[in-house]
Amino acid sequence: MVNNPDVITRVAPAPTGYLHLGHVANALYVWRDARARNGRVLLRIEDHDRERCRPAFEDALLEDLAWLGFEADEPAVRQSDRGALYANVAAQLAQQGLLYGCTCTRRKVHEAWVQGSAEVRYVGACRNASHALSDGVGWRVRMPDDEVRFEDRWCGPQVQVPAQQCGDLLIRDRLGNWTYQFVATVDDHLQGITDVIRGRDLLDSTGRQILLGRLIGRPVPATFAHHALIMKSPTQKLSKSDRDTGIRDLRAAGWSRDQVLAEAGTLCGFSL
Ligand code: GLU
Ligand code: ZN
């Protein structure tokens, strides 16, 4: 029975490829946790990147999830239908003087990468350049220097300083695509997501999403729970191009729903 409006979580696949065992494992974590707390699960199609997403992948993701029996508690939401909402939030940031235009090429930004650091930090070259927020330039948010502390339900206490990790966040790229960090933060806020349950590859993104959430009007963040990634081998992540773990391919090879779920469960260490 779904009756606890205090717990709302989501699965948020990007239709840039087919569903694979890593997605199924994430779905198991999400539905198990939500059901154990009588919470709700929303399904969000993260198709913000118009260059990489394909409607055919979306159809396939939805069909595979339905075949596996994962049923969301509300109709799926698609980010490409939400442009007006994102533009509205961006306009509010601009009004507060928190947005600026950035003309740096990807190459220029990457040149600032410091050997040994986990990611590329934008050093703020355009912060005071007063480039108009127009098409053809990136839009960045001035990130405060704040240290962000949060307690991950599964990874424990975390301290992150987004200004040092990534610098000013890109929210819209030069081609007009909204970025993952922005739309995930906006949607988690507007959809009232109380619990974000996702893989550990996104743990480092959490501090910046909490900070950006504050800037767009969410003083109290969601609770976060990052689970171990399902690995193909001890050093290799699963990827959408690995045909051996694609649900389409397993189905074509004659696997049943229960076999796929059991395989994903084994990879998570669950007994189903
Ligand atoms: N769309 C992201 C992905 O497929 C998930 C983002 C999230 O859970 O915050 O990796
Ligand atoms: Zn720049």
Image: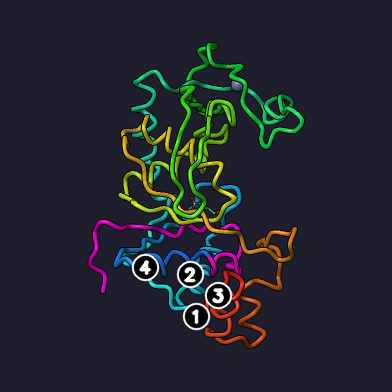
Residue at the disc numbered 4: 72
Residue 193 location, x and y as percent?
34, 51
Asked if the stretch drawn in magenta spans residue 139, the answer is: no
Q: CA distance from mark 2 to mark 3?
A: 7 Å
Q: Is residue 208 above or below residue 78?
A: above
Mark 1 crowdedness (10 Å alpha carbons): few <14, some 14-19, many ≥20: few
- What segment carries the magenta color? 1-25
Residue at the disc numbered 2: 28
Could you tell me which residue is drawn at 46 percent across and 22 percent down? 144
Residue 263 location, x and y as percent?
60, 78
- Circle 1: residue type: Leu
Residue at the disc numbered 3: 265
N-terminal of the pair, mark 4 or mark 2, is 2
From the viewer's side, name the closer residue of 21 and 145.
145
Q: How many marks?
A: 4
- Circle 4: residue type: Ala
Residue 241 location, x and y as percent?
70, 63
Marks 2 and 1 close (CB-CB < 8 Å): yes
Element under label 1?
A: loop
Element under label 2?
A: helix
N-terminal of the pair, mark 3 or mark 4, is 4
Marks 4 and 1 close (CB-CB < 8 Å): no
Could you tell me which residue is drawn at 67 percent across and 27 percent down? 109
Asked if the stretch drawn in magenta spans residue 2, the answer is: yes
